Amino acid sequence: MAGILSAIKLPEAGLSDVTVCEKADRVGGTWRENTYPGLSCDVPSHLYSYSFALWPDWSRRFAPGSEIEAYLERVAADHGVLERVRFGDAVARCELSGDCWRLTTASGHEDEADVVIAATGVLHHPRYPEIDGLESFGGKMFHSARWDHAATLDGARVGIIGTGSTAVQIVSAVVDRVARLSLFQRTAQWVMPQENPPYSEAERVEFHRHPEALEAVRQQQAEVFDVFSSAVVDADSAPLKLIERLCVANLEESVRDPVLRERLRPSYRPACKRLVISPDFYDAIQRPNAELVTDPIERIEPGGVRTDDGRLHELDVLVLATGFKVDAFMRPMEVVGRHGTTLEQAWDPRPVAYLSISIPDFPNFFMLNGPNGPVGNFSLIEVAELQLPYILQLVDLLASGRCRQVSATPRALEDFERRREEAARHTVWVTGCRSWYLDVRGLPAVWPWSFGHFRRMMEAPDLAAYELA
Ligand SMILES: Cc1cc2nc3c(=O)[nH]c(=O)nc-3n(C[C@H](O)[C@H](O)[C@H](O)COP(=O)(O)OP(=O)(O)OC[C@H]3O[C@@H](n4cnc5c(N)ncnc54)[C@H](O)[C@@H]3O)c2cc1C
């Protein structure tokens, strides 16, 4: 998504020599890699679209993943992106040499660039759980982002480890196909009820005929998300309390069995973890063939999952919906900046970047959806679309000859981190849960201010925060 965006916007800004390095053989990123049953966006699709390529034919409010992948492929093809992509070769190393970056790929290909934009994704490297005996499982076992479509689900005994947005989507999608579904829950999740109605033929015709109607829907969806983004960064806000009431009512009203209801009730506040959005998860988990397993997993055996009450949950298929290494970003790519400083050194003990975009000593190297930026339940397309023009203003300093190197100053980064950490203490993310938003210190590694504030910060770089060499 962010690479396609860059390949469209950089040439529009007069920077015609642009190469996108993509290790896979197709565009699509997340939406190419994740193909699990039930995958859909949980940001409304008209908001999860490029502002310059709104799409009148989204089938539903929250489109399935395959539609998003097709959308990205279409936008890339329509905007001449594909000719700019060098497919099938990972960038293994970027090293600053004078004023330019030398890139080396996995196959040994070498290239040079005045500017590098890392658009390598956030939820990209699957995280596998550390459970004894994992490799000994005798059936089909795979991570949700590496779905094995050869695995038969129909009539099978299927186990799913994890209870985040992905696991919830899979449970709803497969429960009626499988003989038995076991959901292994370490932590209960709040579930925000959200219907996913299809767009009618008439609505789509209207969007085709009147692009302003499409704009209006997007605008409406953006306004709702702005309220949400302000809610989560203020643990005492009224909209957050409304979200809480909706989640609690969803649990109370949807789950009939009081024992199951209590096992599904989280011990922390709604939105402390990334909010799970689903119209039908509670229905699915109450099906007669579904079981919520809350006893901790002791080990995996050839026949299934052994929980610490001694029971063996016999399985044919085991899905690891255990998320991603969210602090990897462009790693394992090696990045070597000024004075031989490596990214590993700059990011010890945790990834940092001024405004999520620039790292001191890594001049002319910028990130889209880099560390500590907005992730919440937002549209990351919108985030990248705000970051890129900001980066272009920095690139303009190079193109116009004002400087040969631009990177955030250590002081700007330090000051940003201090303010960010202070603000993070007032967010709902620190109200008593463990989540992938939290860094090694237990502080949220995300943008702790409103989306409106992010928009304002992305309008123009404050050059006092940058070293222009
Ligand atoms: C299951 C799932 C559901 C999601 N749902 C939503 C949602 O509802 N709303 C939302 O806003 N976001 C969602 N996201 C987040 C999603 O990742 C982003 O919205 C978006 O797709 C990120 O795009 P990107 O281009 O930044 O990164 P990616 O889509 O991850 O693309 C990164 C690309 O970089 C390539 N790459 C990485 N390293 C290298 C290298 N060294 N050399 C060459 N190529 C490399 C990868 O192959 C990949 O194609 C979801 C993520 C997942 C996993």
Image (cartoon, rainbow, N blue to C red):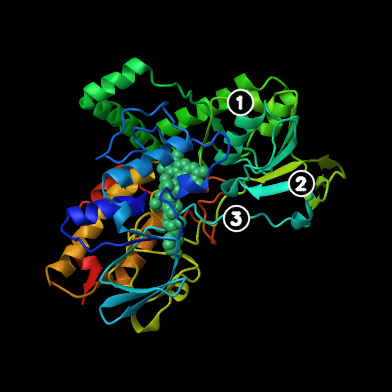
Name above or below for residue 432 compared with residue 240: below
The spot of residue 322 in percent (x, y) is: 62, 49
Estimate the spatial distance between the alpha carbons at disc 1 and disc 2, rounded to whole Å. 33 Å
Q: Is mark 2 within 8 Å of ligand 1?
A: no
Q: Could you tell me the amino acid type at mark 1?
A: Leu
Q: Quadrant of residue 392?
A: bottom left
- Given residues 244 and 295, the one toward you in this image is 295
Q: Residue furthest right?
A: 310
Q: Is mark 3 within 8 Å of ligand 1?
A: no
Estimate the spatial distance between the alpha carbons at disc 2 and disc 3, rounded to whole Å. 20 Å
The spot of residue 49 in percent (x, y) is: 33, 38
Asked whether disc 2 touches disc 3, contact meaning CB atoms under 8 Å apart, the reply is no
**Of the two numbered discs 2 and 3 in the rendering, the one whose residue sits closer to the viewer:** 2
Q: Quadrant of residue 98?
A: bottom left
**What is the count of numbered marks?**
3
Estimate the spatial distance between the alpha carbons at disc 3 and disc 1, rounded to whole Å. 29 Å
Name above or below for residue 327 compared with residue 186: below
- Mark on residue 127? 3
Q: Could you tell me the amino acid type at mark 2?
A: Gly
Q: Which residue is mark 1?
A: 251
Name above or below for residue 425 compared with residue 173: below
Local packing at callout 1 (Cα closer than 10 Å; few below 14, some 14-19, many 20+) is many
Q: Residue at x 47, y 46 (%)?
A: 32
